[in-house]
Image (spheres, grey):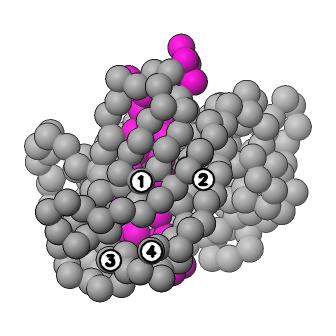
Amino acid sequence: MRFAFLLLIPIFLAGCQKVISVNLNSTEKKYVVSGRITDQPGECQVSITLTKDFSDNNQFPGVSGATVTVENQGIITTLQETGSGLYTSATLTGQPGQTYLLTIRLGGETFTSSSTMPQPVNLDSVYVSTARLSNTKYVTVIYKDPLNIANYYHFIQYINGVQEPSIFVSDDEFTDGQTTKSQLNYNNDIDNPARDIKSGDSIRIDMICNDAAVYKFWYSLSNGATGANESASPANPVSNISGGAVGYFSAQTIQRRSIKAD
């Protein structure tokens, strides 16, 4: 199994060995798509923003006026803009095994992506333990990986309702069919007390199963691309969006577990 984590600056989610050179010069602006359809009702949404230069501020205003649709088995659902650059459907719920096609029409351009929702993998248990060489507390997740099926995992951690800005992703390359115990390690290098887990804290873990293309997006982002609010700046991760935009569209299952830290 490969398991990765990264502190983004400040972004979404796992560190590794590859060195990536980042060009800090001004670049052509690109649309950034962050989209998902899940197996939970009311969670289909697509956000559209624009990339920024490294020297720009870390605010990414939404892009309005797009026509956004999701198609499955010939049925097309048009998402409604419910916020600046945020397009949602309150009724569209995904089904494992189904493939979903995203189409965005914006300013004379068309961007597309497709994603197949995998079968869910059960999140068996979640607990908090203290590191051996420090007083730092970490969350550990336990799940049984299905045998002879390629699986890709993405974990999101919340402490007292605030998302931990680290990317936790893994695959089953070395753990196929095994019961897997993974500690969600992160480095609080900015010494923000709110990020440290303390006794009595409320913790929520989202376990997401996505397809290989979406896993490559998060894995590449965690290994050198940085940005904010899921935005791909300044170094763009591997995108599954066609047509010139960057970002991702994910058909994913999701499970949530909440606990109190001892």
Horizontal placement of 135 versus 242: left or right? left
Camera-side residue: 101 or 94? 94
Assign a secondary structure to mark 1. Answer: strand
Give the amino acid type for the residue marked by disc 2 in the picture.
Gly
CA distance for labels 2 and 1: 27 Å
Q: Position of residue 135 (x, y in %)?
A: 22, 73
Q: Which residue is mark 4?
A: 262
Q: Is residue 112 left or right of residue 185?
A: right
Spot occupied by residue 91 in the image (x, y as percentages of width and height): 87, 57
98 vs 44: above or below: above
The image quadrant that residue 89 belongs to is bottom right
Residues drawn in magenta? 146-173
Q: Quadrant of the N terminus?
A: top left
Judged left or right of residue 124, residue 37 is right
Q: Residues within 10 Å of mark 2 (few under 14, many from 20)?
A: many
Q: Is residue 107 magenta?
A: no
Tell me the residue at 88%/37% (across/down). Answer: 75
x, y percentage for residue 154? 48, 47
Q: Calculate the distance from the C-alpha at mark 4 to the C-alpha at mark 2.
A: 35 Å
Place residue 259 in its image quadrant.
Answer: bottom right
Question: Residue shown at 66%/44% (left/top)?
Answer: 253
Against 20, residue 149 (above or below) is above
Reading the image, the residue beneath label 2 is 35
Q: Is residue 143 visible?
A: yes
- Label placed on residue 140: 1
Q: Mark 4, residues whose alpha carbon is within 10 Å: few (<14), some, or many (≥20)?
A: some
Which-is-in-front pick, marks 2 and 1?
1
Q: Amino acid at mark 1?
A: Thr
Residue 196 image label: 3
